[in-house]
Image (tube, rainbow, N blue to C red):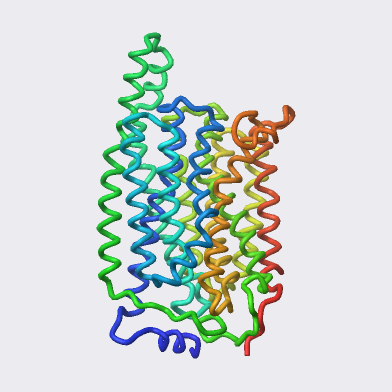
Amino acid sequence: MSMASNTAAALPEKKASYVQSITIIGVLFFVFGFVTWLNGTLIPFLKIACELSIAEALLVTFAFYLAYLCLGLPSSFILKKTGFKNGMALGLLVMAAGSLIFVPAANTRSFGMFLTGLFVQGAGLTLLQAASNPYISIVGPIESAAKRISIMGICNKVAGIIAPLVLSTIVLKNATALEEQIAAATDTAQKSLLLDSLASRVIGPYIVMAVVVALLAFMIKRSSLPEIDTSGNGTGTGGTSSDKTSVFQYPYLMLGVLCIFLYVGVEVMAGDVIGTYGNQLGMSLDKTKYFTAFTLAAMLVGYIIGIITIPKIISQDMSLRISAILGLVFTTCAYFTNGYTAVTFIALLGLANALMWPAIWPLAIDKLGKYTQLGSGLLVMGIVGGGVLPQVYSGLFNKEGLLGFLHSDSINFRQSFLYCMLPCYAYILYFAVAGHKVGKPKAA
């Protein structure tokens, strides 16, 4: 009770209520869920439109998540200057700019320009994530942070389910027939015309997205969303005093950064790579283009479970342990099965992954006090794992791509998936059991 009251005292009077704050942040989570999970559709779309290999198409995730590595720490310094609310609005405007880059990219069918747009979108999301995640963690009691983040996760994953369905319907309509037409085209001019027509399909959706996101930035700027003071020692939720002089003196935070890196990697593998995995199993693009939505639906179920059970039935660290164990089990089952059964187990990884972010973030950011923004920036940098792990996966069975030097003729795509995922889930289990306790200040 005292933690909640301390938090409430830190909020300026006559500002947005607790429920209003949660609602506003929920809208933001919906937005960056919508933008993030479009990548699952963009991978097969750009593979056709820009005539790419699988390894090249997976650069979509690399460019998008690279922004988190490059701008994670700068975002923490920006937030110190702007505050949480203005930082959120600025992040949305940067996302809008990234969406508009898709217009010239589509008109020229330039893969490099598409990657630039994705990087700029990722930059905006980096700032948005760095502001909204610690905000939702410390706006109430830290023990129930995973529950609040689970609510945010529902907003995020509902958007994630809608996004690939909407974009796939627009840009990948009759995808298999179109692929066959392009492959059969013998005249260069005719083939170019088909590819140009396909590429242009993405322009309308991204213009609409840019307008909506820009309007939302204006609304956030004008909203009564309160600031939270994290300048004191402890957590900002009534935590302990500390004589720490550097954020790097919190070992559990550093272990949490690695945990976020690996978690986002397995989340992206389950959501964005599931379609190419299905293609490798011989399934048509008309079917696999919807597979990302299945993974996100499983995550949605996981978030609902988290809201019901945390912290009344299970603790945040226990939910993370269970999730990691499920990840190990489902990955192994996917390897030893075939066809739609294997794809189902990959989709079920969404259930395993759902409560990881809600648990890892508060466990890693707890008791950082004046280092909350900087710690948040470091955690956001870890999100780059979503771009790295798919490249490792591709590199193990494919000579092309950034990590093609990892290639081995004895490793196929199924083994590559297994080798990438199992070590990640094993480390997440370690963090859940012991890592989050290493060097953590004791409560006063």
Q: Is residue 298 left or right of residue 442?
A: left
Q: Quadrant of residue 443?
A: bottom right
Q: Nearer the viewer, residue 168 or 38?
A: 38
Is 390 drawn above or below residue 426 in the view shown?
above
* Residue at x-position 59% and y-position 66%: 319
Residue 290 showing in the rendered view? no
Q: Residue furthest top?
A: 186
* Residue at x-position 38% and y-position 84%: 11
Q: Is residue 148 left or right of residue 443?
A: left
Q: Is residue 291 left or right of residue 408?
A: left
Q: Nearer the viewer, residue 246 or 265?
A: 246
Give coordinates of residue 439: x percent, y percent: 70, 75
Image mark count: 0
Give coordinates of residue 247: x percent, y percent: 62, 72
Q: Residue furthest right?
A: 410
Q: Nearer the viewer, residue 308 or 404?
A: 404
The quadrant of the rendering that contains the C terminus is: bottom right
Give coordinates of residue 154: x percent, y percent: 42, 60
* Residue at x-position 43% and y-position 42%: 116
Give coordinates of residue 431: x percent, y percent: 67, 64
Q: Nearer the viewer, residue 2 or 91?
A: 91
Residue 35 showing in the rendered view? yes
